[in-house]
Amino acid sequence: MWDEWKLPSKLFVQRFWQPATACLTCMPGSLGNVWSLSHLGTALQTGVLAGILAVLLSLTPARRLYGNRLGNALIVGSLAAIADAYSHPNHYGILLGEPLLTGAIAFLLALVSAYLAEDRARRIRAAWARLARRRQ
């Protein structure tokens, strides 16, 4: 039974943190506002909604895009923008400015994380090894 839920669970978690983090960084206001419980709740709502949409999208032929680094980032960015637009009102003066910025940040986070996590995080491990050698 776990094998049936393994992929959707992994997909949800991966697609949850990118929109939630993007939403946290894009909401305007002071640093105190950014770390407030209401803002955190809004970011979590955006992440959960984007994660649910990502799992539902994986049941369609569009799931092939998840295998491509750029296609995956486009999906994540689009779902983050949709989830952000639904989760709370726009705080920027431009129509849909905040959801589009949130989607762009989620796109970049997905692209960078896919690049760094490729091949069991080979790039991260190599950078860590270089840092460890410098300290010796």
Image: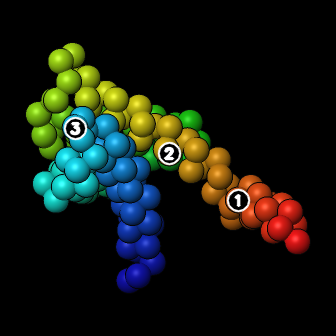
Q: Residues within 10 Å of mark 2 (few under 14, many from 20)?
A: many
| Circle 3: residue type | Gly
Residue under pointer 3: 29
| Circle 2: residue type | Ala
Q: For the residue labelled by badge 1, is the local secondary structure a helix, a strand or a loop?
A: helix
Residue under pointer 2: 110
The residue under the point 42% across, 36% down is 105
Left or right, 111 with respect to 46, comes to right
Left or right, 19 with respect to 95, comes to right
Give how far apart the Cα atoms at labels 1 and 2 are. Answer: 16 Å
Please identify, in this view, whether the residue under mark 3 or under mark 2 is nearer the observer: 3
User: Could you say which disc has been placed on residue 124 in the image?
Assistant: 1
Residue 49 seen by the camera: no
How many numbered circles does the render carry? Answer: 3
Give how far apart the Cα atoms at labels 3 and 1 are. Answer: 33 Å
Q: Earlier in the sequence, mark 1 or mark 2?
A: 2
Quadrant of the snapshot with the C terminus: bottom right
| Circle 1: residue type | Ile
Please identify, in this view, whether the residue under mark 1 or under mark 2 is nearer the observer: 1
- Against 49, residue 61 (above or below) is above
User: Residue 51, percent across and down?
Assistant: 31, 54
User: Residue 112, percent across and down?
Assistant: 58, 44
Give how far apart the Cα atoms at labels 3 and 2 are. Answer: 25 Å
Q: Are marks 3 and 1 in contact (CB under 8 Å)?
A: no
Q: For the residue labelled by badge 3, is the local secondary structure a helix, a strand or a loop?
A: loop
User: Residue 41, percent across and down?
Assistant: 17, 57
Q: Residues within 10 Å of mark 1 (few under 14, many from 20)?
A: some
